Image (cartoon, grey):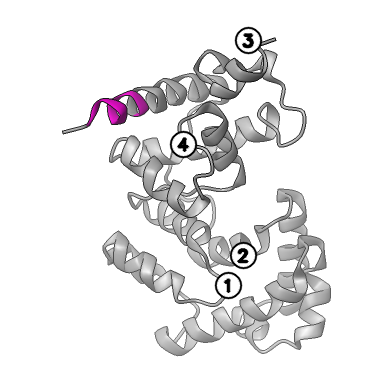
Amino acid sequence: MLMPNDTRQHEKAMAMYVILVATYGERQLKPPRREPMVELIMTILSQRTTHANEALAFKQMWEHYGSWEAIRDADTAELTALIAPSNYAEAKAPHIKATLAQIIRERGEANIDFLEDLPVEEGLRWLLSLPGVGVKTASLVLLFNFSKRIMPVDTHVHRVSLRTGLLAPRTSAEKAHIHLLEMLPSDPHVLYNFHVSCLRHGQKICTWSAPKCPDCPIKHLCDYYRTVYEAE
């Protein structure tokens, strides 16, 4: 049974979900936008960079090497230069090489489709064992590609959830993965659209710097708006 505060947070999460999906559009979870190996490596590249730079880094890497095996065996300095648009390439290049090496060694090929058949907790543990793969990357792969019941929390989802008061102040991104999952229905479609809608909202309205609060469709639900604007 939900405690009163849990019930309030669940109701708030669902009210946000309805409005944000109406604002930014509902998306189908399947078919996946990218095949699982591409999703995994591009999500590693996406860390602390823009979508455009992530895409450029992957394009340059793939056009140069043309296979996962060639990327695994690449000269680290050369790979670092190719993925430089993604930022922090000096850390990402060895992680990508080591991740590919581990997958190919354990699975016999660069393929993670077997995660479809694993329980979400087991799949999460396996992905987290890969070099450079954190809970955000693992959660994105499991939800986006395999429709697992898991809640990815990137910087935008985290910011929106903290500012609205859906999460308690100073809740870490790691704990947010758990708390948001508890608030939302056990439906991968809902989890996916909550993630995508909060991401879009964080990019367009609830930006890190100078959020556009007066234009926000969920300002009546937002603790930050109430504190900063209504208090004036």
Q: Residue at x 63, y 82 (%)?
A: 97
3 and 4 marks in contact (CB < 8 Å): no
Give the CA separation, mark 4 to mark 2.
Answer: 26 Å
Give the percent coordinates (x, y) of residue 112.
Answer: 43, 71
Q: Amino acid at mark 4?
A: Leu
Q: Tell whether label 1 touches label 3 (CB within 8 Å).
A: no
Residue 12 in percent (x, y) is at: 40, 23
Q: Secondary structure at mark 4?
A: loop
- Secondary structure beneath label 1: loop
Q: Which residue is mark 1?
A: 132
Q: Are marks 1 and 2 in contact (CB under 8 Å)?
A: yes
Quarter of the figure with residue 145: bottom left
Local crowd size for mark 1, using a 10 Å CA cut-off: few (<14), some (14–19), many (≥20): some
Identify the disc placed on residue 44: 2
Does the stretch in magenta take in 24? no
Say few, some or many: other residues with alpha carbon within 10 Å of mark 4 (under 14 / 14 to 19 / 20 or more).
many
Question: Which span is picked out in magenta?
Answer: 3-9
- Which numbered marker is on residue 230? 3
Whether residues under marks 1 and 4 lie with C-beta atoms below 8 angstroms apart, the answer is no
Gap in angstroms between the C-alphas marked 1 and 2:
7 Å
Q: Which residue is mark 4?
A: 167
Q: Residue at x 72, y 21 (%)?
A: 212
Mark closest to the chain's N terminus, 2 or 3: 2
Indicate the amino acid at tag 2.
Ile
For numbered disc 3, what is the local secondary structure?
loop
Q: Nearer the viewer, mark 3 or mark 1?
A: 3
Q: Left of 47 or right of it: where is 122? A: left
Front: mark 4 or 2: 4
Q: Front-most of 177 and 46?
A: 177
N-term mark: 1 or 4: 1
| Residue shown at the point (61%, 46%) measured from the top left | 155
**Front position among marks 2 and 3:** 3
